[in-house]
Amino acid sequence: MFTIKGRCNCDAVNFEFKISKEKQVVYMCHCSICRRASGTNGVAVMITDKSEFRWLIGEEKIKTWHKSAHDWACSFCVECGSSLPGENDPERMYVPVGLIDNADLEGVRVAHHLWVDSKAPWDEITDDGEQHRQGIG
Ligand SMILES: [Zn+2]
Ligand SMILES: [Zn+2]
């Protein structure tokens, strides 16, 4: 298991999680909700077990917004607005990979593209990650 640390732009929120090398892959979601949340082509996250994740500092700075009528939420730092990790399902957390230093991302690649059917017209996928027309469980 590797320990990976992440933090927001203002450094108020810090976290770490343990993850095996095999699970260190990026899921890139291109859906319209993730596009609005990020302001760009979507979100890129790693998925980790909730039991392996912990907040180090700043948990009180986290605000979570739930999109009504969708099983969707996003969390961000109330000080700087950086996207933050959140609950993927009862057992797993998603971690936006942009919060992680490059040194902790050696060899990490995009393994899955989600909601490719609804991606932005200017968004061109050029890596060999598996493309899924919609989401995956
Ligand atoms: Zn912050
Ligand atoms: Zn999405």
Image (cartoon, grey):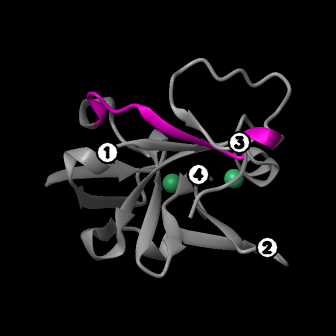
Is residue 109 covered in magenta?
yes
> Circle 1 — which element?
loop
Residue type at mark 4 is Cys
Dots 2, 1 in contact, CB < 8 A = no
Asked whether residue 77 appears in the rendered view, the answer is: no
Foreground tag (2 vs 4): 2
| 2 or 1: tag closer to the N-terminus | 1
Q: Within 8 Å of ligand 1, the CB of disc 4?
A: yes
Amino acid at dot 2: His
Magenta part of the chain:
105-117
User: 130 or 57: which is nearer to us?
Assistant: 130
Residue 30, numbered label = 3
In contact (CB < 8 Å): disc 1 and disc 4: no
Label 3 near ligand 2 (CB < 8 Å): yes
Q: Going from the N terminus, do you reach mark 3 or mark 2 first?
A: 3
Residue sitting nearer the eye, 84 or 126: 126
Decide: few, some or many residues near mark 4? Use Cα within 10 Å; few <14, some 14-19, many ≥20: some
Residue 102 to residue 88: above or below: above
Q: Report the side of 77 relative to 52 (left or right).
A: right
Q: How many marks?
A: 4
- Label at residue 49: none
Which circle marks residue 70 in the picture? Answer: 2
> Residue at point 45% right, 42% down?
26
Of mark 3 and mark 1, the one earlier in the sequence is 1
> Which residue is nearer to you in this view: 81 or 45?
45
Residue 24 disc label: 1
**Disc 2 secondary structure class:** loop
Q: Earlier in the sequence, mark 2 or mark 4?
A: 2
Residue 137 sits in quarter: bottom right
Disc number for residue 80: 4
List x then y, in percent, for residue 32: 81, 48
